[in-house]
C-alpha cells in the first residue's frame, strides 16, 4: 500500500471548489431513470448519455467520477475510452465495486450489501482500467423505533471495513458509504441517532481492519427527517445537526466527506451543503458526491435526443457549478435563477 499516493488522491477528490459525480447507476437503476424520461435503456443510449456529461463544461467542477462496470470499459462515439475523457477533463475515474444488496436473514426489512467475493482480483482489473478510487454503498433501513438492528449495522460496517482494506491494498482510495435511508416517517432526531450509531460502528471496523484514515473518503447521508415525516427540518437545522454528528464521529485524519443526495431535491442538496460550509472551520473538507441531485436536471433536458445535448450539458454544468459554490459556502438561492 502506498499511503502517500492514496492520501494525494483522496485530497484531490475533495479539492476546493470541486466534488464528485456519482454516475455509477447499475443497469437496473439507470433503466429506472431512463424510463422516467421515456428513453430506452440500451448500451448505446447509456454511453451517449454519459458521454454527454463527461464532455460538458461542468466537468471543471468535478474532481472524480464514479463509474459502473459497463461504463469504465466503454468508448465514446469517436472511439476514445470514456475513462480518457474523464482524465482529459481533469477528473479522476472511480468505480462502484459493491454488487447491490440482499435481504439480511433473520432481520425482516433489512439488507446487507454484497460483493466481497473475488474483490481483490476485481480491484486489480479496475486499477489497470484507470480507476484510482472505488465506492461501496451500505444501505441502512430505518423506521421510527425498530430498525436498524444491531445485526444490520454490524454486518454492513464489517463489509465496509473489509472492502476499504482491500481497496487500500490495491492502491485504490475507498469511498466508504454508509447510507441511512430517507424513506420513512421518522424525524431528524431519529436519523441523527441512527446515523451516529452507524458511523461509530463503521469507524470501529475501519480501525479493527487497519484502514488508513488518511487514504479514504467518507460518503454519508445528512441528518434529515424521513421523506414521509410531517416534521421536516429547515436548512439550518440539517446543517447544524449534520456537522455536530460528523464532529462526534469522524476523526480529523479523514481528508474529506462527500455527501450523497439520497433523494433530496436538487436545490435542498445544494442548500444543505452550502449551509454546512458556512459553519466555520471544520477538520475535513465537505463536498458533494451526488447522483440524482446532479443528474435529474440534465436527464430531463436531454430526454434521449441528440439535438438536446447542449441543453443537457448546460443543465449539468449549472448544477455542478451550484454545488461547487456550496462546497465553498458561496452559494445563494438567487444564483439558482441564473440561466442554466
Ligand atoms: P444519490 O446522490 O442519488 O444518493 O447517489 C449517490 C450515490 O452514489 C449513492 O450510492
Image (cartoon, rainbow, N blue to C red):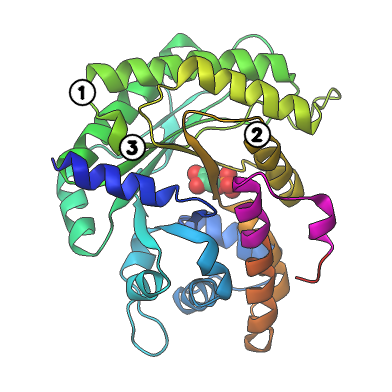
Q: Position of residue 212 (x, y in %)?
A: 25, 30
Q: Is residue 217 above or below residue 202?
A: below
Q: Main secondary structure of the magenta part?
A: helix
Coordinates of residue 306 in the picture (x, y in percent): 62, 87
Q: Which residue is mark 3?
A: 216
x and y percent of residue 35 in the render? 65, 64
Number of disc labels: 3
What's the magenta region?
320-337
Do we see residue 97 in this rendering? Answer: no
Judged left or right of residue 23, residue 8 is left
Residue indicated by mark 1: 210
Which residue is denoted by mark 2 in the rendering?
276
Task: For marks 2 and 1, give the one nearer the viewer.
Answer: 2
Dot 2 lies on which element?
helix
> Residue 119 is drawn in which quadrant?
top left
Mark 2–mark 1 Cα distance, whole angstroms, equals 30 Å
Distance, label 3 to label 1, CA atoms, is 12 Å
> Which image quadrant for residue 309?
bottom right
Residue at horizontal 53%, vertical 29%? 282
Q: Earlier in the sequence, mark 3 or mark 1?
A: 1
Image: 127 above or below 56: above
Amino acid at each position: 500500500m502506498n499511503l502517500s499516493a492514496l492520501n494525494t488522491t483522496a485530497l484531490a477528490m475533495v479539492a476546493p471548489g470541486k466534488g464528485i459525480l456519482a454516475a455509477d447507476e447499475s443497469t437496473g437503476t439507470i433503466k429506472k431513470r431512463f424510463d422516467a424520461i421515456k428513453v430506452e435503456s440500451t448500451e448505446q443510449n447509456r454511453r451517449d448519455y454519459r458521454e454527454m456529461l463527461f464532455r460538458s463544461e461542468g466537468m471543471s467542477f468535478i474532481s472524480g467520477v464514479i463509474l459502473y462496470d459497463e461504463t469504465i470499459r466503454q468508448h465514446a462515439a469517436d472511439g476514445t475510452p470514456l475513462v480518457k475523457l474523464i482524465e482529459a477533463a481533469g477528473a479522476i475515474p472511480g468505480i462502484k465495486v459493491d454488487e447491490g444488496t440482499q435481504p439480511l436473514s433473520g432481520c425482516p426489512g433489512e439488507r446487507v450489501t454484497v460483493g466481497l467475493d473475488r474483490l481483490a482480483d476485481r480491484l486489480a482489473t479496475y486499477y489497470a482500467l484507470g480507476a484510482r478510487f472505488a465506492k461501496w454503498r451500505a444501505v441502512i433501513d430505518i423506521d421510527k423505533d425498530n430498525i436498524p438492528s444491531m445485526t444490520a449495522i454490524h454486518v454492513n460496517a464489517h463489509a465496509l471495513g473489509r472492502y476499504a482494506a482491500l481497496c487500500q491494498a490495491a492502491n485504490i482510495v475507498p469511498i466508504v458509504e454508509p447510507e441511512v435511508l430517507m424513506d420513512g416517517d421518522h424525524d431528524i432526531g431519529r436519523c441523527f441517532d441512527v446515523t451516529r450509531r452507524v458511523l461509530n460502528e463503521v469507524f470501529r471496523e475501519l480501525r479493527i481492519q487497519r484502514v488508513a484514515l488518511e487514504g479514504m473518503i467518507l460518503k454519508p447521508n445528512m441528518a434529515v427527517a424521513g421523506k414521509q415525516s410531517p416534521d421536516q427540518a429547515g436548512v439550518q437545522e440539517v446543517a447544524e445537526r449534520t456537522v455536530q454528528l460528523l464532529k462526534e464521529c469522524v476523526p480529523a485524519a479523514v481528508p474529506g466527506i462527500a455527501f450523497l443526495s439520497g433523494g433530496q431535491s436538487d436545490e435542498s442538496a445544494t442548500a444543505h451543503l452550502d449551509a454546512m460550509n458556512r459553519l466555520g472551520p471544520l477538520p475535513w473538507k465537505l463536498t458533494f458526491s451526488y447522483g440524482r441531485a446532479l443528474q435529474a436536471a440534465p436527464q430531463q433536458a436531454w430526454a434521449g435526443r441528440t439535438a438536446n445535448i447542449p441543453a443537457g450539458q448546460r443543465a449539468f454544468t449549472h448544477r455542478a457549478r451550484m454545488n461547487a459554490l456550496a462546497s465553498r459556502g458561496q452559494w445563494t438561492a438567487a444564483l439558482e435563477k441564473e440561466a442554466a
